[in-house]
Image (spheres, rainbow, N blue to C red):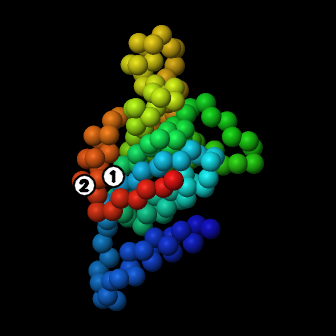
C-alpha cells in the first residue's frame, strides 16, 4: 500500500514534466474536514502527507476543520482492529515537525478547548492530543498563500 501512495505522489508531480526536468520540491498545505472514523479521507491524507514528506516536499501546515477536529482528541479510543489516527498524527508531528493546527471555532463548538480556555471554563484538562495546536483561520490563510498546492480531504 505504501508503494501505491509513493507512486501516486511521484506520478502527480512528474506527469506533465519533460524527461530531462530536474526534480523540485513543492510546498503543500492540507485541510482535513472529516472525522477520523466517518470515512477514509483522514487516513488517506495522513498517508499522502507522510509520503510527500519522505520525498522531500515541504508540508507547511495541516489544518483540521469542521469534523476534522476529532483527529485531535487526546482521549479518543478506536476499536483494536482500527488505526488510531490521533496517535499516527501525533507521531508524524513529532518525527517530522509538521504543524498540525486545529480550527479554534470548530474545536470550541465540539468541546475541544485550548489550555487557556479550559482554565477559564474551570476544566482541568484541555483534551488536545500531543503535536496539535489550536489557532484561527488566519493561520490557514497564511499557509494557503505560502503554498504551491493546497489539498482538501473530506
Measuring from the top left, give residue 19's x and y in whole percent.
34, 89
Check disc 1 and report the residue beneath it: 60
How many C-alpha atoms fall within 10 Å of the one at disc 2: few (<14), some, or many (≥20)?
A: few
Residue at 46% of width from left, 70% of height from top? 9
State whether residue 16 appears in this view. yes
From mark 1 to mark 2, how far is it between C-alphas?
Answer: 8 Å
Residue 146: which disc?
2
Residue at 29% of width from left, 53% of height from top? 144
Q: Is residue 6 above or below residue 33?
A: below
Q: Is residue 16 above or below residue 130?
A: below
Callout 2 secondary element: helix
Q: Are marks 1 and 2 in contact (CB under 8 Å)?
A: yes
Q: On the picture, is 21 further left or further right than 49?
A: left
Residue 140: which disc?
none
Q: Earlier in the sequence, mark 1 or mark 2?
A: 1
Callout 1 secondary element: strand
Where, by quadrant of the figure, is residue 79 drawn? top right
Measuring from the top left, give residue 119's x and y in whole percent.
43, 14
Measuring from the top left, give residue 123's x and y in whole percent.
50, 14
Judged from this view, the residue extending furthest toward the top is: 122
Q: Is residue 118 above or below residue 128?
A: above
Amino acid at each position: 500500500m505504501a508503494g501505491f501512495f509513493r507512486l501516486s505522489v511521484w506520478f502527480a508531480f512528474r506527469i506533465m514534466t519533460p524527461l530531462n526536468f530536474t526534480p523540485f520540491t513543492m510546498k503543500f498545505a492540507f485541510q482535513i474536514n472529516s472525522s477520523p472514523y466517518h470515512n477514509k479521507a483522514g487516513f488517506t491524507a495522513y498517508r499522502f502527507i507522510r509520503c510527500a514528506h519522505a520525498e522531500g516536499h515541504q508540508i507547511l501546515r495541516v489544518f483540521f476543520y469542521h469534523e476534522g477536529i476529532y483527529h485531535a482528541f487526546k482521549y479518543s479510543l478506536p476499536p483494536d482492529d482500527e488505526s488510531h489516527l490521533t496517535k499516527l498524527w501525533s507521531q508524524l508531528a513529532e518525527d517530522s515537525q509538521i504543524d498540525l493546527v486545529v480550527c479554534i471555532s470548530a474545536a470550541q463548538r465540539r468541546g475541544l478547548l485550548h489550555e487557556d480556555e479550559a482554565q477559564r471554563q474551570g476544566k482541568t484538562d484541555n483534551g488536545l492530543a500531543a503535536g496539535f495546536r489550536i489557532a484561527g483561520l488566519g493561520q490557514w490563510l497564511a499557509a494557503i498563500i505560502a503554498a504551491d498546492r493546497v489539498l482538501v480531504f473530506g
